[in-house]
Image: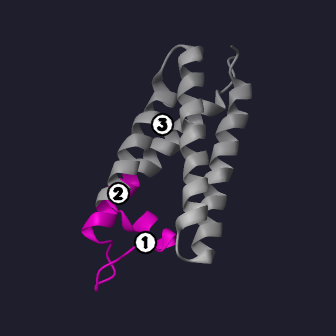
Amino acid sequence: MKSIDASRVLGAATALYSIAIMVRPAWLAQPCDLPRDSDGRPTRQTGLLIRAIGARDTAIGIAMTVVGSESTRRSATWCRVAADAAGAALFGALLESRQARWKVAGFALSWATLCALSLRSTHS
């Protein structure tokens, strides 16, 4: 019986969440305490930034999920680790709210760690 490749599962979760924030940018804007307009929705600029991040992360997540070669999946997973580690560093240093910095950086660093650990489930 073939074992489940954890990096594929994390890739699918990444892709799904990334698509979700492209559709509803508020789901990332709110925990990051990013600028919102008077009705509470993310500003146009905030929405653009979140959608760009979502598009990048969707591509990485899909690659982690569907590529056939283990070495290519490992490379895609390392891209995910790098993107989340960079996000943790930037959000952790630059978000205005201390609470948002800790929450968002902690989540991004946790996801980077999970993805790095998932590399143990591949065989190359």
3 over 94 or under it: above or below: above
Task: Residue at 73% x, 36% y: name it.
Answer: 117
Kind of residue at disc 3: Gly
Write the start and end of the magenta stretch as one range. Answer: 19-47
Q: CA distance from mark 2 to mark 1?
A: 10 Å
**In the picture provided, is 119 more to the left or to the right than 26?**
right
Kind of residue at disc 1: Leu
* Residue corresponding to mark 1: 34
**Location of the C terminus (image quadrant):** top right
**Sequence-wise, which precedes: disc 2 or disc 1?**
1
Q: Secondary structure at mark 3?
A: helix
**Sequence-wise, which precedes: disc 3 or disc 1?**
1
Q: CA distance from mark 3 to mark 1?
A: 24 Å
**Location of the N terminus (image quadrant):** top right
Q: Residue furthest left?
A: 44
For this rendering, which residue is in front, 60 or 66?
A: 60
* Residue corresponding to mark 2: 49
**In the picture provided, is 107 more to the left or to the right than 23?**
right
**Sequence-wise, which precedes: disc 2 or disc 3?**
2
* Residue corresponding to mark 3: 61
Magenta stretch: includes residue 39: yes
Task: Residue at 48% x, 36% y: name it.
Answer: 61
63 over 17 or under it: above or below: above
Task: Residue at 48% x, 20% y: name it.
Answer: 67
For this rendering, which residue is in front, 86 or 81?
A: 86
Magenta stretch: includes residue 35: yes
Q: State the image coordinates of residue 54 (x, y, percent, origin top left).
A: 39, 49
Kind of residue at disc 2: Leu
**In the picture provided, is 44 more to the left or to the right than 84?**
left
